[in-house]
Image: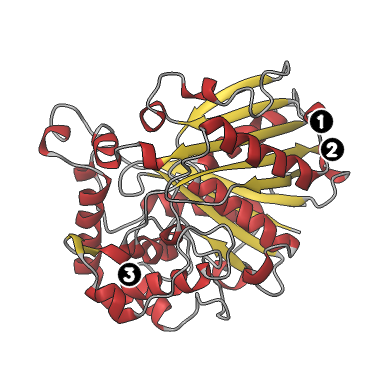
Amino acid sequence: MSGIDNIAIVGVGQTSIERNKLGDTFADMVFEATQKALEDAGMTMDDIDNVITTSNDFWDGRTISTMAVGDACGAGMGKNMSALEGDGTFSCFYGMTRILSGVYGTSLVVAHVKGSESENLQITNAIFDPIYMRPIGLDSLNTAALQMRRYMTKYGISEEQCAKVSVKNHKNAMKNPYAQIKKEVSLEDVLDSRLIADPLKLYDCSPISDAAAAVIIAGGDRAKKAKKPVWVKGVGYCADAFFLGDRDLADAVALDMAASKAFEMAEITDPLNEIDVAEVYDAFSYMELMWYEGLGFCPVGGGGKLIDKGVTEMDGELPVNPSGGLLSGHPVIVGGMIRLAEAVLQVRGDAGDHQVKGVNTALAHGINGACGQSHCVWIVGR
C-alpha cells in the first residue's frame, strides 16, 4: 500500500441537511451522526479510543463550543477528547495523526453547525484583520464576489460556465436523500436569479444550513478487521497568505500544493484519469471551476472548458459532486467532512441513487478561510 499504511475510514454518518432544524439541538444532531457512524462501522463506544469535535464558538454563539456536544459523541465516557475549529476535513486529518502517533487505534471525529442560528456575514467579517480589513465590511460573500470577478477577468471565464456548475449540482442533489435543496434549475434560472453581490447571483451561492456528521478512522489490525474499510491513500493540506492582497485570488496555489502532496502519497500522476469521483467544496459555483484547476484536473484557467465538455457530469469522465455538493446544502464546518463521507460511500458502492459506477479511488476536499485560504485534500480507495 502506498502513502499512508494501514489507515482506513471504517464508519461514516450524517444527518439530513436542513435550512432550520428547529427540533434539534447541537447535541441532538451530533448524537444522531455519531450513532449512525458507529452502526455503519459495526462498533460501539467501547471500540473508540479518542474523540475529536469540530465546531466554532462564533457559529455556536458560546465559548468552548465543544462542551455542548461532549456527552452526545461519547466524550463523557472516559474518552480522551480534543477540539478543533474549522472545516471537518482538517479535524479528520488530526484524527488520523493521533492514530499514526501509536497512542490510539481509533478516532471518532464529529462536526456540527446550525447556520440558521448564526449571522453569517457578521461572523465571517470577524475572520479579517481588525485594523485594515474588518472595518470596510469584508465578509465571506463580498470577498467571494471579488474572487469570482478576478477569476473571470483573468482567465476569460463566463457567467454561463459558472452557472453550469449550479445546474449540474442541483440536478445531482435530486438523488441525494440528505440534500437540503432538491430542485432542478436551468441555465436560464441561474443567470436570471437575483443578484446577491456582483457577479454572484442567488443560484451561484450555497444556502444557510444545519447539519452534523461523524467519521470513524482506524489503524493497523483495527482497520483490517473492519466491516467495510476504505483505505486512506493520501492526504495533503496547505495554507496561503491571510491578507487577500497578498495573493492572486484567481489562482488556487494552496490547493495545488495540498493536492500535490496527496497525489504523491497516493502515487497518482494523472488525476483526471486516475480518480473515479471527486467531492469538492463548492460554496459558490465559480469555486468548483477554480478547484478543478488546483486539483490538476485541467490546466490553470481551464475550468470553464472542462465544465463545457461535460467531463464532470454524473456520466462524465470524472463525476464531480454527485451528491449535489454544497450548492444543495452548506453546513459550514461540516461541509468538508460530508465530502469525505460521500467519497467513502462512493468507494464502498453505498451511495444509493447517486452512486457512480466503478469507483475504486475517490477524492474529497475541504477549505478554511476566506476565498479558499487553506485546503485539505483526501484520496481514499479500495
In whole angstroms, how far apart are the C-alphas of marks 1 and 2?
A: 9 Å
Please provide percent x and percent y for residue 205: 32, 59
Quick one: SS at disc 3? loop
Amino acid at dot 1:
Asp
Q: Confirm whether residue 182 shows in the render.
A: yes
Please provide percent x and percent y for residue 318: 56, 73
Please provide percent x and percent y for residue 192: 23, 75
Q: Are marks 3 and 2 in contact (CB under 8 Å)?
A: no
Amino acid at dot 2:
Arg
Q: Quadrant of the C terminus?
A: bottom right
Amino acid at dot 3:
Gly
The disc label shown at residue 301, or none: 3
At x 25% / y 47%, what residue is drawn?
247
Q: Quadrant of residue 92?
A: top right
Q: Confirm whether residue 6 shows in the render.
A: no
Q: Are marks 1 and 2 in contact (CB under 8 Å)?
A: yes
Q: Quadrant of residue 357?
A: bottom right
* Residue at the spot of label 1: 47
At x 45% / y 61%, what residue is drawn?
328
How many labels were placed on the picture?
A: 3
* Residue at the spot of label 2: 222
- Chain-order first, disc 3 or disc 2: 2
Q: Nearer the viewer, residue 257 or 229?
A: 229
Q: Nearer the viewer, residue 266 or 52?
A: 52
In the image, 251: left or right of 90? left
Q: Nearer the viewer, residue 13 or 356?
A: 13
